[in-house]
Image: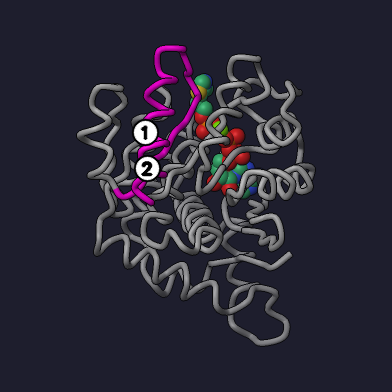
């Protein structure tokens, strides 16, 4: 048993006062995953080239339907058919920006949720300005790593290791996340060892996952697409949907780690675990706290 899964067993055994994880989160996350498997939401992803495979396979394995359709000319016909949109600026080039904006604007007009992944938002002026313009189009959820959320919150270029965070802990971005959530009206999620999710007032921490998930390209992008699928199911409760998606994805990582020999096999076993995950395993492993 891995350290993470052993810890999950110890801490989430419904033993009353000693259990730091409120009991309602397990049933909430399970209800959403069961609903996803039944309703199979269609998620349009305008996402980077690195992540297309991982994000699509994450969505399919969980029970959703991905569509990596990104050309501007297709948006008026296709986007209205979707249940959620994921916009990810990872391999941004100027020709993609009008389609990203048009798809986001259409989702807002249709009253449907959309989610932004501001990959490396602080790395260049072009990237930062594009992300700030997208934030102005009212994403339902913004999910990034610590450096990305700090750059967006301050609206300034800032330290990152390319697409990775230069900040050691997601907690370094807690105040930035709350401030961004308040100014944008979006739910903001900062991923890391503990994923933070906030609407500007309420803050929850998701304690699932394993460190090796950072060693797989596009796990962050994949979990953002996964959040979009969860938010499609319950757009009026985006904080609950986002925390649940992060927890379920982290649990798939924990279960995958039991069989994995390294990042490449973890990727395979994480995806397999999303399909295999059942109610009992999920309920025993969800670790979400109010902060
Ligand atoms: N140290 C860690 N322990 C457990 N899970 C982690 C850790 N670091 C990242 N994760 C998980 O890996 C996924 C990607 O997060 P992260 O690496 O922060 O995103 P990004 O790839 O966008 O920088 C998330 O689901 C997150 O919860
Ligand atoms: C390596 C890379 N370069 C541009 S986008 C991308 C993928 C980033 O994926 P993630 O943010 O999930 O680590
Ligand atoms: Mg990322």
Looking at the rendering, the stretch of residues picked out in magenta corresponds to: 83-111
Task: Answer yes or no: is residue 215 visible.
Answer: no
Depth check: give the residue in front, 248 or 40. 40
Disc 1 packing (10 Å; few <14; some 14–19; many ≥20): many
**Residue 20 screen position, x and y as percent:** 70, 74
Q: Residue furthest front?
A: 109
Residue 244 painted magenta: no
State whether residue 155 is above or below residue 42: above
Q: CA distance from mark 2 to mark 1?
A: 6 Å
Depth check: give the residue in front, 11 or 205. 205
Asked which quadrant contains residue 76, the reply is: top left
Answer whether labels 2 and 1 touch (C-beta < 8 Å).
yes
Tell me what residue is drawn at x 29 percent, y 22 percent. Answer: 71
**Residue 62 screen position, x and y as percent:** 33, 53
According to the picture, the residue beneath numbered tag 2 turns out to be 107
According to the picture, the residue beneath numbered tag 1 turns out to be 103
Q: Quadrant of ligand 1?
A: top right
Q: Residue furthest bottom?
A: 16
Q: Is residue 28 left or right of residue 129?
A: left
Asked which quadrant contains residue 45, the reply is: top left
């Amino acid at each position: 048993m891995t350290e993470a899964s052993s810890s999950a067993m110890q801490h989430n055994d419904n033993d009353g006062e000693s259990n730091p994880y409120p009991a309602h989160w397990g049933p909430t996350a399970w209800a959403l995953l069961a609903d996803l498997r039944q309703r199979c939401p269609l998620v349009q992803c305008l996402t980077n080239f690195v992540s297309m495979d991982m994000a699509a396979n994450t969505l399919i394995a969980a029970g959703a339907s991905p569509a990596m359709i990104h050309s501007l000319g297709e948006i008026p016909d296709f986007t209205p058919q979707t249940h959620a949109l994921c916009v990810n600026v990872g391999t941004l080039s100027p020709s993609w920006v009008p389609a990203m904006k048009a798809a986001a604007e259409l989702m807002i007009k249709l009253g449907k949720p959309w989610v932004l992944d501001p990959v490396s938002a602080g790395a260049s002026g072009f990237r930062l300005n594009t992300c700030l313009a997208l934030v102005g189009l009212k994403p339902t959820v913004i999910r990034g790593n610590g450096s990305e959320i700090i750059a967006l919150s301050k609206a300034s270029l800032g330290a990152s290791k390319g697409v990775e965070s230069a900040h050691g802990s997601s907690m370094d971005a807690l105040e930035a996340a709350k401030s961004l959530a308040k100014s944008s009206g979006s739910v903001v999620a900062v991923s890391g060892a503990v994923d933070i999710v906030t609407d500007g007032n309420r803050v929850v921490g998701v304690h699932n996952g394993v460190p090796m998930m950072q060693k797989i390209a596009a796990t962050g992008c994949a979990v953002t697409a996964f959040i979009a699928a969860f938010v499609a199911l319950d757009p009026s409760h985006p904080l609950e949907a986002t925390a649940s998606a992060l927890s379920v994805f982290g649990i798939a990582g924990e279960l995958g780690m039991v069989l994995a020999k390294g990042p490449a096999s973890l990727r395979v076993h994480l995806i397999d675990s999303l399909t295999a995950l059942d109610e009992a395993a999920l309920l025993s492993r969800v670790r979400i706290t109010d902060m």
